[in-house]
Amino acid sequence: MSDLPRRAVARSAKLASLPIGFAGRTALGLGKRIGGKSAEIVSQEIQQRTAEQIFKVLGELKGGAMKLGQALSIFEAALPQEIAGPYRATLTRLQDAAPPLPAATVHKVLIEQLGNDWRDNFLSFEDRPTAAASIGQVHKAVWHDGRTVAVKIQYPGAGKALLSDFAQLARLGKLFGALLPGLDVKSVLTELRERVAEELDYLNEAQAQHAFALEFRDDPDFVVPDVIAANEQVLVSEWVDGTPLSRIITDGTKEERDRAGLLLVRFLFCSPARVGMLHADPHPGNFRITGDGRLCALDFGAVNRLPQGYPPAFGQLTRIFNSGDMDSVVQGLRDEGFILPHIEVEPEALRAFLAPYVEPTTVEEFTFSREWLQEQAATVTDLRPGNVTRQLNLPPSYVLIHRVHAAGIGVLCQLGTTARFRDEVVRWVPGFDEDDPWEQAAAG
């Protein structure tokens, strides 16, 4: 691969190879089954080869295809083991790795963005990237003042590539339906597409990252590397060493996984109150655990700006849900625009749909697990969640909050974290605690 594929025809050919290849492997599997191999073994072989091709094609395309792969990788925790197993390792690789651009292409981008004398900014620059993701890759370097830095470089043509990818991926719903049955891929793509312009502008990202870095400087729980320099397509920030969260998921001790999950929840819940923003891309590739046990947050291209913090109704409705008063929950959801006036919702179906998001707040300590999430998914399926999903409206102000919570639950189940999550909700989410000042003011 000499460069990021940009021409629509070339990228369409890459994407088209996915369903065609999938169909070919399915046919091959049927041949093997007739030849005597068991259906289970054949199915596993097909899934493994399909997963490998998905990684190869999505990884090479980067852009929107890569972002979809990352989004799908979060939800694998909800799948039964026999379905998720062959995909898990492949999808996890999509969270923080992709085939890198060659050094010549990287140098070309740096010349275009920083000028022919771009090397004068650095005492040294490593051509091999330390991370390659959806719209850019990161190189380790030493800034001219001696500081070790991370240099994030946007892929050439990333904007056009993203728009092309989303148009093509919308036509591949059947393939990803085989990967994750029941997932509404079109809605995922629509939401991701809406964030494209924001994530492509590294100046916007730099402003958000700097705000987080200022708030969490010298924090006992969190590290956010500050921005040193930036323009629209190159972002230079402080370098932070640490263990990727994806490695904690696969190799961490129970204590390490519990600690990482609690810190992730604390970071997501406290940020709107402390910074006025919510980190809106919580996949494991964006987090590290530092040597002193703190959570390092990276990649602020997608943030939800919440200058007043979490909407108070969010905490209030969670508390009312826990009390069992579903009629008040339904009315509250109507007031917030989740249920439109002409729509009637079955309260018990709604309860089953919301339970995975709320259950961890009902006990002092909760354990997230793949098994728990699979049980929740099965319960919702029994009560026809598609009907509830189609009946609910997602107000624009809640789109990213919903995305973060759904993705966060997936990561916590991958970690298998046990912790006092309710304490974090009580502390940071207005309206959840009956003694909360907002609640008292509303009652008065």
Image (cartoon, helix red, strand yellow):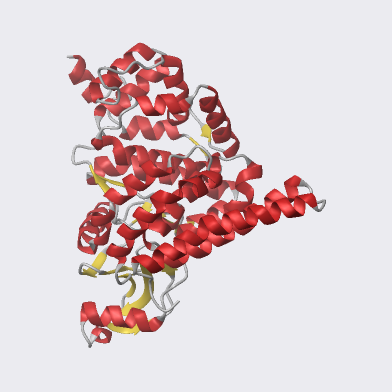
Across and down, in percent, residue 428 comes to 31, 35
Q: Residue at x 36, y 52 (%)?
A: 222
Asked if residue 259 can be seen in this view, the reply is no
Q: Quadrant of residue 357?
A: top left
Q: Quadrant of residue 52?
A: bottom right
Asked if residue 29 can be seen in this view, the reply is yes
Q: Residue at x 40, y 65 (%)?
A: 11
Across and down, in percent, residue 210 comes to 23, 58
Q: Residue at x 28, y 63 (%)?
A: 159
The image shows residue 183, relative to residue 206, as above or below, that is above
Q: How many marks?
A: 0
Quadrant in which the C terminus appears: top left
Could you tell whether 13 is left or right of 84 in the image? left
The image shows residue 107, relative to residue 310, as above or below, that is below
Q: Nearer the viewer, residue 254 or 334?
A: 334
Q: Quadrant of residue 314?
A: top left
Across and down, in percent, residue 342 comes to 27, 17
The image shows residue 181, relative to residue 9, as above or below, that is above
Could you tell whether 170 is left or right of 178 in the image? left
Q: Nearer the viewer, residue 76 or 170?
A: 170
Quadrant in which the N terminus appears: bottom left
Across and down, in percent, residue 48 comes to 64, 56
Could you tell whether 148 is left or right of 277 in the image? right
Q: Residue at x 24, y 25 (%)?
A: 336
Q: Nearer the viewer, residue 194 or 243?
A: 194
